[in-house]
Amino acid sequence: MNSILIADDHPLIVKSIFSLIREVFPKVTIYTASNWKEVQLTFIEKIDVFILDLEMPCGDAADTIEHINCKFPKAKVLILTSHTQSWVFQGLSELKIDAFVSKLSEPSEIIEALVQLNKNQLFMCTEFKRVYSYIKKEITGFEQLTKREKEVLTLILDAKSTKEIALDLSVSENTIETHRKNLFLKYEVKNVVGLVNKAMGYGNLKRVF
């Protein structure tokens, strides 16, 4: 690991991480950026690790990370964010992300992440491990649905009514209502809004099917 880019629109965070890395990895070249446009300006350099805040001005996180994946296939991407909700995984599921670190993590976790990335290992901080474990638990629940329940859930997520689902599956509306009630029980929700919110909150369900 010869070069690192730290990108965050909060100068205090950039300076803190810069000092932390410099102390542990004194020979590494460190670049900084405060927005996505500045990140792209570093593409003329060889960057080994990109430490990226998700919410920065002058660009889009997913587009920039996708460009990094294409231009620097061997480069590592470390996401540094204050958000540890499941949408972070969901929104970036198509991209190559090598490490997730919460801004609430101990400083030692940033260093551990870099050590693991240097060994070509993936890394998740303690908080992201907790969130990921919860997501996996939910996905396991998806896989325990019956084939018909999965079909009904897919059509519910496509915003189809009970009548439309019944026509699509060639069954009665009462049968669809029974499947719907079973889905409510399995997802521990009380209505369709809760079902959709919970289902869509843990990744792309159609992949599970």
Image (cartoon, rainbow, N blue to C red):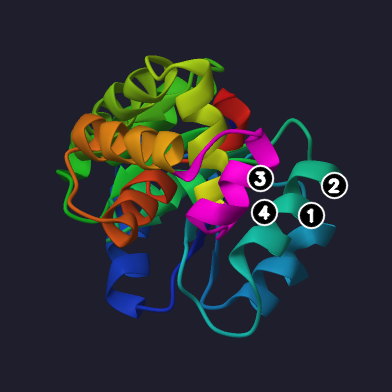
Query: In percent of the image, x 57 and y 31: which residue is there?
Result: 151
Label 1, label 3: how far apart the Cα atoms are: 44 Å
Query: Most extreme residue toward the bottom, as rendered?
Result: 58
Find residue 144 and report its horizontal and vertical position in percent: 37, 14
Disc with the residue nearer the chain's start (1 vs 3): 1
Three-letter amino acid code of the residue under disc 4: Ile
Label 2, label 1: how far apart the Cα atoms are: 6 Å
- Indicate whether 3 appears above or below 186: below
What residue did someone put label 3 on? 167
What residue did someone put label 4 on? 65
Which image quarter: residue 93? Answer: top right
Three-letter amino acid code of the residue under disc 2: Lys
Which image quarter: residue 77? Answer: top right
What residue did someone put label 2 on? 71
Q: Nearer the viewer, mark 2 or mark 3?
A: 3
- Secondary structure state at the residue bearing disc 1: helix
Are circles 1 and 4 on residues that touch, CB within 8 Å? Answer: yes
Disc with the residue nearer the chain's start (2 vs 3): 2
What residue did someone put label 1 on? 67
User: In the visual, does 40 lie left or right of 142?
Assistant: right
